[in-house]
Image (cartoon, rainbow, N blue to C red):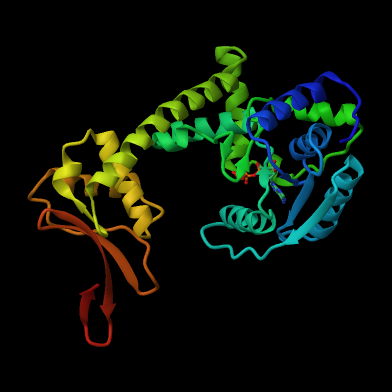
């Protein structure tokens, strides 16, 4: 373990990281971008636990990205990590560059973690932005509940720490973080929330808006955990092979029905359900006349997954178009 100077900011971060380790002992790798948040997290992790490794993902999206990644890896070694590896990834761009880069990053980190927990450096401010974005877009409780401190194998020890504290810790430690130009690019909605909307809200409502949003998220996560358990139980009782027994699900409260249906569809391959699709499927459950099919995405190329109510069961069936014959079929 490394000895660090004892400034106020790094002590606060070490305290948060120590509490996280006490609750979840085990080997860790730190996901290091080279920014202030993950540099401060890396410094605190090596001071609090032995044998920390760092993983740096090179998305290869800007010229010189490999140099930035190499510099982050060297900083990790100087800080006392026993190993620091750069992981080059291919970003396919599907569904927007940012989302594709995130997918590629999480996949690479998961592949390289070798059984260890992965610490990511999201802060209280990241949490507040996530919640505000969710509220403003009318998202469901899952989005507004924000990110969890622990969502195996991902750990977020800094969710209670302000971003300003990680900046201050880097100054105390004499570290020069990488400043990602995207973090000040007003073309990104999240950047405008951070630089314009949240300061305006704090001006109107007084400081403490970001911690208040983070508290809301924490309360919702607690409530959601209970509802998720009840919905799991409902799903277990209503499963009939790959289908759902309508009479068992239909009598449950809406919040449980929706969660159970979402979990069932996730298992059969539909991972990105919109609120509208869920509502329509709910209509099939509670109204016996609901006979239509609801396409829910998922399925191999050329096919689509469709949910139908039939003979007291809800079934998710693959449908495909037989373009050559002009017919369609299901499996
Ligand atoms: N290139 C990278 N290599 C390794 N870890 C990274 C990289 N970029 C980001 N991370 C990790 O993810 C954390 C969050 O980063 P950032 O806020 O940029 O991501 P995001 O796209 O908003 O992430 P998300 O919503 O991941 O889960 C960072 O603090 C760091 O721990």
Q: Give the number of marks.
A: 0
Residue 318 on image: x %, y %: 28, 68
Residue 26 sits in which quadrant? top right
Residue 69 on image: x %, y %: 81, 54
**Image side of residue 150 versus residue 15, left or right:** left
**Image side of residue 316 versus residue 183, left or right:** left
Residue 177 on image: x %, y %: 83, 40
Residue 37 sits in which quadrant? top right
Residue farthest top in this picture: 206
Residue at 28% across / 36% down in the picture?
256
Residue 233 on image: x %, y %: 30, 40
Quadrant showing the C terminus: bottom left
Eyeballing the image, is 254 above or below 313?
A: above
Residue at 43% across / 37% down in the picture?
142
Quadrant showing the N terminus: top right
**Image side of residue 253 versus residue 112, left or right:** left
Eyeballing the image, is 247 above or below 164?
A: below
Residue at 28% across / 74% down in the picture?
320
Residue farthest bottom in this picture: 324
Eyeballing the image, is 207 above or below 106?
A: above
- The quarter of the image that holds ligand 1 is top right
Q: Which residue is at the front of the view, 135 or 330? A: 330
């Amino acid at each position: 373990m490394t000895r660090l100077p004892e400034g106020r900011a790094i002590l606060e971060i070490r305290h948060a990281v120590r509490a996280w380790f006490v609750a979840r002992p085990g080997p860790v790798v730190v996901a290091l971008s080279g920014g202030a948040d993950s540099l401060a997290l890396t410094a605190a992790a090596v001071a609090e636990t032995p044998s920390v490794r760092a993983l740096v993902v090179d998305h290869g999206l800007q010229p010189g990205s490999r140099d930035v990644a190499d510099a982050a890896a060297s900083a990790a070694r100087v800080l006392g990590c026993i190993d620091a590896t750069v992981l080059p990834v291919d970003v396919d761009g599907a569904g927007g560059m940012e989302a594709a880069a995130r997918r590629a990053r999480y996949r690479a980190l998961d592949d390289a973690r070798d059984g260890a927990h992965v610490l990511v450096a999201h802060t209280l401010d990241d949490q507040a932005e996530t919640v505000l974005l969710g509220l403003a877009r009318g998202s469901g409780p899952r989005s507004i509940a924000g990110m969890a401190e622990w969502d195996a194998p991902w750990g977020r020890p800094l969710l209670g720490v302000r971003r300003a504290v990680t900046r201050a810790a880097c100054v105390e430690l004499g570290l020069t973080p990488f400043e990602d130009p995207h973090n000040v690019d007003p073309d990104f909605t999240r950047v405008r929330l951070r630089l314009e909307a949240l300061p305006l809200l704090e001006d109107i409502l007084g400081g403490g808006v970001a911690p208040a949003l983070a508290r809301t998220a924490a309360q919702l996560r607690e409530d959601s955990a209970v509802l998720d358990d009840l919905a799991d139980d409902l799903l277990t009782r209503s499963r009939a092979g790959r289908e759902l027994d309508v009479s068992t699900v239909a009598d449950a409260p809406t919040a449980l029905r929706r969660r159970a249906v979402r979990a069932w569809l996730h298992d059969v391959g539909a991972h990105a359900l919109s609120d509208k699709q869920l509502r329509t499927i709910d209509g099939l459950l509670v109204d016996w006349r609901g006979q239509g099919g609801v396409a829910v995405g998922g399925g191999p190329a050329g096919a689509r997954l469709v949910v139908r109510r039939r003979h007291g069961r809800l079934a998710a069936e693959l449908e495909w178009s037989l373009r050559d014959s002009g017919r369609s079929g299901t499996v």
